Image (cartoon, grey):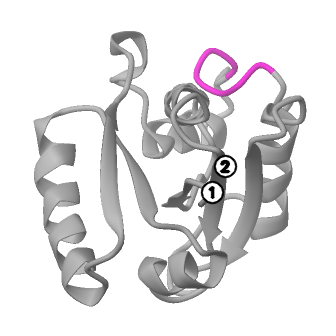
Amino acid sequence: MKRTAIFPGSFDPITRGHENVILRAAQLFDQVIVAVGNNSSKKCLFDVEKRVGFIEQTFVTNPKIEVDTFDGLTVEFCRKMNAKYILRGLRNALDFEYEKSISQLNKELDSEIETVFLITAPEFSAISSTIVREIIINHGDASAFIPAQIKL
């Protein structure tokens, strides 16, 4: 059976921390699907198509990494994609507490889906999409915090 992991998120925008986690996960799984959530109640800087494009540009040379969009529950998307793993990146203890709660709820929703946590490399632990968005909105240079393939 193919080991497929879903890495859900808003990726508004994708950061070097995300890139680090995804590339490392591609060494562990047969397929990693970066799942861009389409949440109409969340105000995003970039539309879904732009975020998908950024991710596709970043991993264009890696056939194990795919990009898709989804609405609704992550476990439902996992079922649809025949994935048994949810991938989450952790930067710090606060991330862990938040992600632990979500993973426990997901386990209640579907006991066959496992959440796998990867700790972001130390050099990327301070980077968040929220901070990168603020830099971009305020016309700063965010190039050190986003994948090299992305040109804003």
Residue 60 picture location, percent across and down: 89, 36
The answer to the question of whether label 2 and label 1 lie on touching residues, with beta carbons closer than 8 A, is: yes
Tell whether 100 sits left or right of 140.
left
Tell whether 31 sits left or right of 43.
right
- Kind of residue indicated by mark 2: Gln
Magenta-colored segment: predominant secondary structure: loop
Q: Would you say residue 112 sits in the magenta stretch? A: no
> Residue 31, relative to residue 131: is it above or below?
below
Depth check, mark 2 against mark 1: the one in front is 1
Residue 63 picture location, percent across and down: 84, 39
Q: Residue 93 versus residue 86: which sits nearer the camera? A: 86
The residue at the point 80 percent across, 35 percent down is 59
Q: Which residues are magenta?
A: 143-148
Q: Earlier in the sequence, mark 2 or mark 1?
A: 1
Question: Badge 2: few (under 14), some or many (20 or more) residues near its Cα, within 10 Å?
Answer: some
Q: How far apart, in angstroms, are the residues tagged by discs 2 and 1? A: 8 Å
The residue at the point 11 percent across, 37 percent down is 93
Task: Determine the secondary structure under disc 1.
Answer: loop
Q: Would you say residue 146 sits in the magenta stretch? A: yes
- Kind of residue indicated by mark 1: Lys
Q: Residue 15 versus residue 73: which sits nearer the camera? A: 73
Q: Is residue 47 visible?
A: no
The residue carrying mark 1 is 2
Tell whether 5 sits left or right of 108.
right
Q: Please tell me in which quadrant of the rendered image residue 112 appears.
A: bottom left
Residue 91 picture location, percent across and down: 28, 32
The residue carrying mark 2 is 31
Q: State the quadrant of the N terminus.
A: bottom right
Q: Please tell me in which quadrant of the rendered image residue 47 appears.
A: bottom right
Q: Residue 12 versus residue 24: which sits nearer the camera? A: 24
